[in-house]
C-alpha cells in the first residue's frame, strides 16, 4: 500500500453491506471499545469468530475501504499478494480505519514480533493491489516496514507471515509457489515496488512450504 493511494478504480466503490455484515461489524466495534479486563471471555470468543486465521487479532478496516463479497463463491481466490506498508504497523491500521484513504488489506504483520492483525474478512475484497481483477482473486498481506529498510524484515515477521500464507494456501487450494504468491510489484499495471529487492523470496516460499 502507499499512505496516499492513487485514484481507486471506479469499480471499487462502496456498496451497501448486507445486514448481517453490518451487525457483525457493529458488534466487533462495540466489543473492541470495551476494556479487555472487563470482558475477557466474551471478547476472546468474539475475536475467534471474526477472524479467518485464528492467531490473528481482529482490527477491522472501515467498510468504506473494501468491497463486501462472499468469496470464494463470488470470486475464486488463487493468489496471495505480499506488500510492505511504507509506514508503521499502528499507522497502517489507522489508515485502514480512515474512510478517506480508500485502501485496505486483509492482514497486517508487525515487524518486531510477527503479530498478525486481520482487518478485512477473507470473503470480502480488500483494496490493496490497485487492480480490480487482482483484488477480487487475492488475499492481501501487508508487512510493517519500508522497501529500503531491510532491518524491518525480521525472522519473526518472515516466519509468522509464512504461517499465515500457508494457512491461506491450504484453505483455498492455492499452490505454494511464486506464480501464486506474488509481490505487489508483480500486479499488472502497478507502479508500486513493494515488497522490494530486500524481500527474501526464496526464504519466504521455503518457509510457506514447511510451515
Ligand atoms: Zn503494496
Image (cartoon, rainbow, N blue to C red):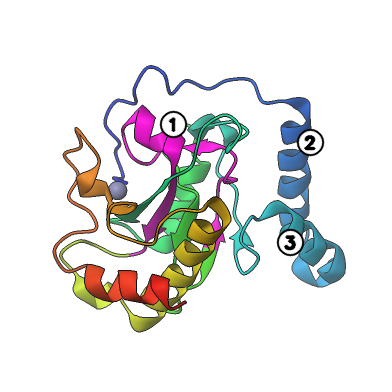
Tag 3 residue:
48
Q: Callout 3: 10 Å neighbours few (<14), some, many (20+)?
A: some
Give 5 or 197, whichever is nearer the viewer: 197
Residue at the (34%, 52%) spot, across then down = 180
Picture coordinates of residue 45 (x, y %)?
81, 62
Q: Callout 1: 10 Å neighbours few (<14), some, many (20+)?
A: few
Mark number for residue 23?
A: 2
Earlier sequence position, callout 3 versus callout 1? 3
Tally of numbered discs: 3
* Image vertical order of residue 151 relative to residue 6, above or below: below
Q: Callout 2: 10 Å neighbours few (<14), some, many (20+)?
A: few
Mark number for residue 77?
A: none
Which is closer to the viewer, label 2 or label 1?
A: 2
Picture coordinates of residue 112 (x, y %)?
40, 78
Residue 128 drawn in magenta: yes
Q: How far is the residue under mark 2 from the one under mark 1?
A: 22 Å
Left of 145 or right of it: where is 170? right
* Image vertical order of residue 150 relative to residue 31, above or below: below
Which is closer to the viewer, label 3 or label 1?
A: 3
Give 2 or 80, whichever is nearer the viewer: 80
Asked if the residue at tag 2 contacts the one at tag 3, i.e. Cβ–Cβ closer than 8 Å, the answer is: no
Left of 160 or right of it: where is 26? right
Which residue occupies the extreme bottom position in the image? 155
Tag 1 residue:
100
Residue at the (41%, 80%) spot, across then down = 156
Residue 31 drawn in magenta: no
Give 76 or 91, whichever is nearer the viewer: 76
Give the SS element for disc 1.
Answer: loop
Asked if the residue at tag 1 contacts the one at tag 2, i.e. Cβ–Cβ closer than 8 Å, the answer is: no
Q: How far is the residue under mark 3 from the one under mark 2?
A: 16 Å
Give the SS element for disc 2.
Answer: helix
| Magenta segment boundaries in residue numbering | 117-144
Amino acid at each position: 500500500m502507499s499512505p496516499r493511494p492513487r485514484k481507486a478504480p471506479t469499480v471499487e466503490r462502496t456498496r451497501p453491506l448486507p445486514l448481517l455484515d453490518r451487525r457483525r461489524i457493529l458488534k466487533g466495534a462495540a466489543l473492541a471499545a470495551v476494556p479487555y479486563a472487563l470482558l475477557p471471555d466474551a471478547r476472546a470468543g468474539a475475536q475467534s469468530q471474526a477472524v479467518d486465521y485464528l492467531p490473528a487479532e481482529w482490527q477491522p478496516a472501515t467498510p468504506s475501504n473494501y468491497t463486501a463479497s462472499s468469496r470464494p463463491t463470488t470470486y475464486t481466490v488463487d493468489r496471495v499478494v505480499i506488500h510492505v506498508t511504507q509506514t508503521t504497523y499502528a499507522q497502517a491500521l489507522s489508515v485502514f480505519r480512515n474512510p478517506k484513504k480508500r485502501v485496505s488489506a486483509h492482514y497486517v504483520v508487525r515487524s518486531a514480533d510477527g503479530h498478525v492483525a486481520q482487518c478485512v474478512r477473507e470473503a470480502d475484497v480488500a483494496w490493496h493491489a490497485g487492480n480490480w481483477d487482482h483484488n477480487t482473486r487475492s488475499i492481501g498481506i501487508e508487512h510493517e516496514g519500508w522497501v529500503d529498510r531491510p532491518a524491518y524484515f525480521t525472522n519473526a515477521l518472515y516466519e509468522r507471515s509464512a504461517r499465515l500464507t500457508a494457512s491461506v494456501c491450504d484453505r483455498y487450494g492455492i499452490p505454494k509457489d511464486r506464480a501464486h504468491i506474488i509481490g505487489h510489484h508483480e500486479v499488472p499495471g502497478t507502479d508500486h515496488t513493494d515488497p522490494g529487492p530486500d524481500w527474501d523470496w526464496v526464504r519466504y516460499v521455503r518457509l510457506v512450504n514447511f510451515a
